[in-house]
Amino acid sequence: MLKINDFNLPGHDSLSNMAPPSRIKLLKNKKILSDHKKAAVLMLFYPDNNNNTRMVLILRNKYNGVHSNQISFPGGKMEKEDENLELTALRETYEEIGVKSSSINVVNKLSSVYIPPSNFKVQPFVGFSENNLVFKADKKEVSAIITPLFEELINSKIVKSKVLVNGTTQLVPSYLIDNQVLWGATAMMVYEFIEFYFDVTNS
C-alpha cells in the first residue's frame, strides 16, 4: 500500500489551484464564518482482487441542496456523539458505504477545506484497508460508489468543466473520473494528496 504515514501538506495555497474562481479570494483570505459547521470525510484506499490500489468515491443522490449529484468522499456532519472528527469520518463511512471502522487504518489528515455555500469546514482524513472491501451503499444518500485505480488517479489531468455554482454556470478546474466531473472541495483534496504523494516519492 501507499507510504502515507509521514508527509508535509502543500497547504491552502496549493488548494487554490483547484478552487472554483469564486472561492479563490476567500481561500487566500482564509475567511471562515465563526458559526461554521464541522464535518469530516475519509479518503480511503484499498487493494482490489488483483492487488491494485483503489480509492473510494461516492456519487451523491439528487436532492434539494448545494451538493446534490456531486462526487465526494464518504463523510458528513459532526454529530454530538462523535468524540472527534476522525470518528465522524469513520461513522459516516460506515453509514454511507457499509465499511466498518475495524477494517480501516487512519494514518493522517489533509488540510481542512471551508465550503462557503454550506458553511462547512471539512476535515479530510486518509486511511487504508489491508484487504479488498465489500460495499453496501446507503440508497438514501449514495447513487453510486466509484473506485478509480490509484495509478489512474495520480496521472489524471486537470481540465476545465462547466458546472453550476451558486446558481450560475462557471468554468472550474476539475478531474474526469469514470466520465464524472470531480470538482470543488473534493477535487481540492485530491489535488493536495497527489501533490504530497509526488513530493514523498521524489524525495
Image (tube, rainbow, N blue to C red):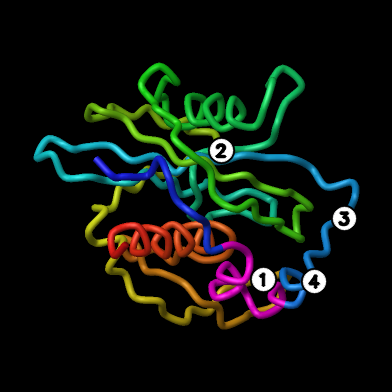
Residue at position x 48%, y 25% in the image: 94
Q: How crowded is mark 1: few (under 14 residues within 10 Å), some or many (20 or more)?
A: some
- Say which residue label 4 marks: 29
Give the CA separation, mark 4 to mark 2: 26 Å
Q: Disc 4 marks which amino acid?
A: Asn
Give the CA separation, mark 3 to mark 1: 19 Å
Give the CA separation, mark 4 to mark 3: 12 Å
Q: How crowded is mark 4: few (under 14 residues within 10 Å), some or many (20 or more)?
A: few
Residue 47 vs residue 159, the one in the foreground = 47
Task: Tell me the element at label 3.
Answer: loop
Q: Where is residue 108 in the image (x, y as percent from the top left)?
A: 49, 39
Give the CA separation, mark 1 to mark 4: 20 Å
Q: Does the magenta stretch include residue 89?
A: no
- Say which residue label 1 marks: 165
Residue 186 vs residue 179, the one in the foreground = 186
Looking at the magenta stretch, what is its main secondary structure?
helix
- Left or right: where 194 falls relative to 95: left
Q: Where is residue 16 in the image (x, y as percent from the top left)?
A: 61, 73
Viewer-side label of 3, 2: 3
Task: Tell me the element at label 2.
Answer: strand
The stretch in magenta equals 11-24
Upstream in sequence: badge 3 or badge 2: 3
* 194 relative to 19, above or below: above
* 26 relative to 160, above or below: above
Upstream in sequence: badge 4 or badge 2: 4
Viewer-side label of 4, 3: 4
- Say which residue label 2 marks: 75
